[in-house]
Image: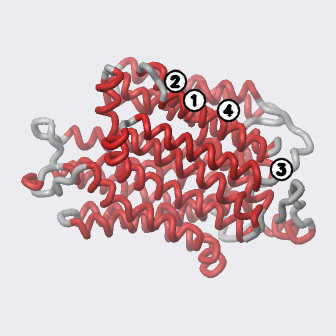
């Protein structure tokens, strides 16, 4: 791969991996944060809630901006904003500043849909598929690596170094992008639908806030129901606005197409299955051996047990493109969804020994990476070029919403069967089975996606080759 092509993929992948790992290191370090900043449990929860809400709001907006403006410039701006947020969190004198910094940092998730459009504009279809796979795989690997590194770094250097090391990583990614990522042409026309963005952002913020606080307040508590009702009353008018404006933030008619709708549904289910599992599995691994199902693992060993999930996802993701050409993309989409079901189902049936846990998480890592990568490749192939990043943004928001809902519902299932506050083995089994059952919906969604690119699009691709992106002096494609 040429220097520029390597940078187009490598710089955003490094950035995504650094911030994904940093976020995962925070959970084990929360006791240190609480002691140093005298933070209440409720305030600690907002460290993650604030970042989650910001991510949900910014991702679709960034996706649309990426469809309209120079993606290189937008990438550098997002890197700078996120890096500033991480630095603010690392130097925070109190928990309020830490929460603010993490909320600013949360805009980094917008880089995910931006990369789909960036790869499509600057790389060949084969390399773009490889890039999408690396984004998905490295994010999974970084999550597992973060769990392993959290303990040693925070114990040896202090929790603030979790942020400061991330700042160094973001700076390296930013410099790499500055020198190697080429500029991309601006869209011929279009405008940002700020009214739609305001309504969508407000609705998503209310929805995510309701989901993240439901376990503490109760799903039927008046405050929870009020948040969900407010979200519905905000998202409803947003849909009306999007259907009426000439240049919507999210083209709902396009999103209702078979490929966008199918991939979005798959991402929603994958988010539920993966995050529901991430809540349940560490608790089960940490349970004492005397319970009959726990392995008595500490934070380091929990990360080691889950590490194969990230490794498997990283290794298989770049192979999704060749697999799709060999087997057909629908077969690969179905395969990924089926593996997610199989991995969670295996954990429900067999989880009494380390090798069984490793086998289950490895299969799930393979399935999630294959399914999501193939879905993003399908979006890049089937959606018009000036909407690819925006639709990908909706896909990642759906995954985030599914993950938040899965984590809360998984915690509720575990709590409902707990004895003296300790989850029972049956509660873990039910959580895994629920994730496996919902995974069948992802299989069904995969069948909705067309098996091949529509003929009209294929003819257009042959008759109108992609425009080469602008390249700065000294760079090559």
Q: Is 179 placed left or right of 200 in the picture?
A: right
Q: Residues within 10 Å of mark 4 (few under 14, many from 20)?
A: some
- Say which element carries label 3: loop
Residue 206 in the image, given as x and y percentages of width and height? 52, 25
- Say which element carries label 2: helix
The image's colouring method is secondary structure
Sequence-wise first label, 1 or 4: 1
Seen at 77% across and 30% down, the residue is 193
Q: Can residue 17 be seen from the camera position used here?
A: yes
Sequence-wise first label, 2 or 4: 2
Q: Residues within 10 Å of mark 3 (few under 14, many from 20)?
A: many
Q: Which residue is mark 3?
A: 183
- Say which element carries label 1: helix
Quarter of the picture containing the N terminus is bottom right
Farthest residue to the left: give it: 290
Seen at 52% across and 43% down, the residue is 166
Quarter of the picture containing the C terminus is bottom right
Considering depth in this image, is 344 or 52 the residue closer to the camera? 52
Q: Which mark is residue 104?
A: 1
Report how far apart the C-alphas of labels 1 and 4 lie in the structure: 27 Å
Badge nearest the viewer, 1 or 4: 1
Report how far apart the C-alphas of labels 3 and 2 lie in the structure: 31 Å
Residue 319 in the image, given as x and y percentages of width and height? 58, 73
Considering depth in this image, is 398 or 168 the residue closer to the camera? 168
Seen at 81% across and 54% down, the residue is 182
Q: Which mark is residue 100?
A: 2
Considering depth in this image, is 457 or 290 the residue closer to the camera? 290
Q: Which mark is residue 239?
A: 4
Residue 325 in the image, given as x and y percentages of width and height? 66, 77
- Say which element carries label 4: helix
């Amino acid at each position: 791969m040429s220097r520029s092509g390597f940078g187009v993929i490598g710089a955003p992948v490094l950035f995504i991996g650094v911030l994904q790992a940093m976020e995962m290191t925070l959970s084990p370090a929360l006791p240190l944060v609480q002691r140093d900043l005298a933070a209440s449990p409720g305030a600690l929860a907002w460290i993650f809630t604030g970042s989650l809400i910001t991510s949900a709001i910014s991702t679709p907006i960034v996706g649309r901006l990426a469809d309209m403006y120079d993606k290189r410039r937008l990438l550098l701006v997002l890197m700078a904003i996120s890096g500033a947020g991480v630095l603010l969190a690392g130097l925070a004198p109190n928990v309020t500043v830490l929460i603010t910094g993490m909320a600013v940092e949360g805009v980094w998730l917008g880089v995910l849909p931006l990369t789909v459009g960036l790869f499509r504009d600057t790389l060949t279809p084969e390399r773009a598929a490889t890039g999408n796979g690396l984004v998905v795989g490295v994010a999974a690997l970084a999550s597992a690596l973060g769990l392993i590194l959290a303990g040693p770094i925070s114990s040896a250097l202090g929790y603030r170094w979790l942020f400061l090391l991330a700042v160094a990583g973001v700076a390296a990614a930013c410099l790499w992008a500055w020198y190697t990522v080429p500029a991309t042409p601006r869209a011929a026309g279009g405008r940002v639908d700020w009214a739609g963005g305001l309504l969508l952002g407000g609705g998503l913020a209310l929805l995510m806030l309701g989901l993240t606080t439901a376990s503490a307040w109760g799903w039927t508590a008046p405050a929870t129901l009020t948040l969900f009702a407010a979200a519905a009353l905000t998202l409803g008018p947003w849909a009306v606005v999007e259907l009426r404006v000439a240049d919507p933030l999210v083209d709902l008619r396009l999103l209702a197409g078979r490929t966008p709708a199918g991939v979005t549904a798959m991402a929603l289910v994958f988010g539920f299955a993966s995050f529901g599992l991430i809540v349940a599995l560490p608790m089960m691994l940490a349970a004492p051996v005397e319970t009959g199902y726990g392995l008595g693992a500490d934070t380091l060993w929990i990360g080691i047990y889950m590490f194969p999930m990230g490794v498997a996802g990283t290794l298989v993701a770049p192979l999704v493109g060749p697999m799709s050409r060999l087997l057909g993309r629908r077969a690969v989409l179905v395969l990924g969804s089926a593996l997610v079901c199989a991995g969670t189902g295996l954990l429900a049936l067999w989880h009494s020994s380390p090798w069984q846990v490793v086998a289950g998480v490895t299969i799930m890592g393979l399935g999630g990476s294959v399914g999501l990568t193939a879905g993003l490749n399908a979006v890049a192939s089937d959606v018009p070029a000036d909407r690819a990043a925006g639709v990908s943004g909706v896909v990642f928001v759906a995954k985030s919403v599914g993950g938040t809902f899965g984590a809360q519902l998984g915690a509720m299932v575990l709590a409902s069967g707990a004895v003296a506050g300790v989850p029972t083995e049956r509660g873990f089994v039910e959580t895994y089975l629920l994730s496996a059952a919902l995974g069948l919906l992802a299989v069904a969604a995969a069948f909705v996606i067309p098996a091949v690119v529509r003929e009209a699009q294929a003819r257009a691709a042959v008759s109108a080759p992609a425009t080469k992106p602008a390249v700065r002096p000294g760079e090559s494609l």
